[in-house]
Amino acid sequence: MRAFTFRPDVLAQIRHDRYHHPHPRVQRKMEVLWLKSRGLTHADIAELADVSPRSVQRYLDQYEQGGLDRVRHLNWQGKACALDEHQPSLEDYFIEHPPRSAREAQEAIERLTGIRRGLSQVRAFLKKKLGWPGARSARSPRRWTPTSRRAT
């Protein structure tokens, strides 16, 4: 078990980030550092923080290598959306043919790209990438107008 000494200013940052950092994985890492600062064993830290003993070692290695900035860094990028490469053509299509619903957009996306996505994925793509406000119910069939047009 390695010995770590945390300066008071670092402990204050750890204490804050345990509950107030925007990402829950960083909060968990800070909890591990906080428990380490209290002198607990790695096995106890792993049990209390609900992580594996190897994760405890990995978080401490990160702190040792680069301090809190390294611990706050997340390497996770997520999966790339298959529709991203079709974004310009889909945007042009939906500007010319605004969808009335997410289902209509889903059918158009499948027809144009050959990629089938669920309604929630279609809504998320349209909202995040194209500024679409969301699906309307059949009782309020307002047409979508793009919030921002692509520069031509």
Image (cartoon, grey):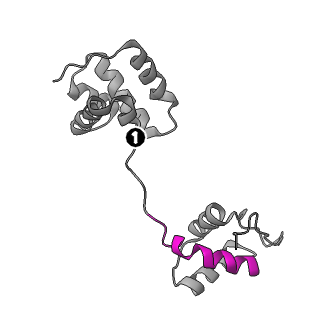
Depth order, front residue of 149/109 = 149
Q: Quadrant of the C terminus?
A: bottom right
Provide the residue designation for mark 1.
Answer: 73
Find residue 118 and report its image quarter. Answer: bottom right
Judge whether 105 appears above or below 59 on screen: below
Q: Is residue 22 magenta?
A: no
Which residue appears at 38% of the width and 28% of the height?
31
Q: Which SS class for mark 1?
A: loop
Query: What residue range appears in magenta?
Result: 80-97
Q: Examine the residues drawn in magenta and state their main secondary structure.
A: helix
Say which of 6 and 150 sits in front: 150
Residue at the image position 78 percent from the left and 70 percent from the top? 144
Q: Is residue 115 above or below residue 1?
A: below
Q: Position of residue 109 (x, y in %)?
A: 60, 80
Name the image quarter holding residue 94: bottom right
- Residue 57 lies, in percent from the top left, at 22, 34
Of the 4 image quadrants, the one containing the N terminus is top left
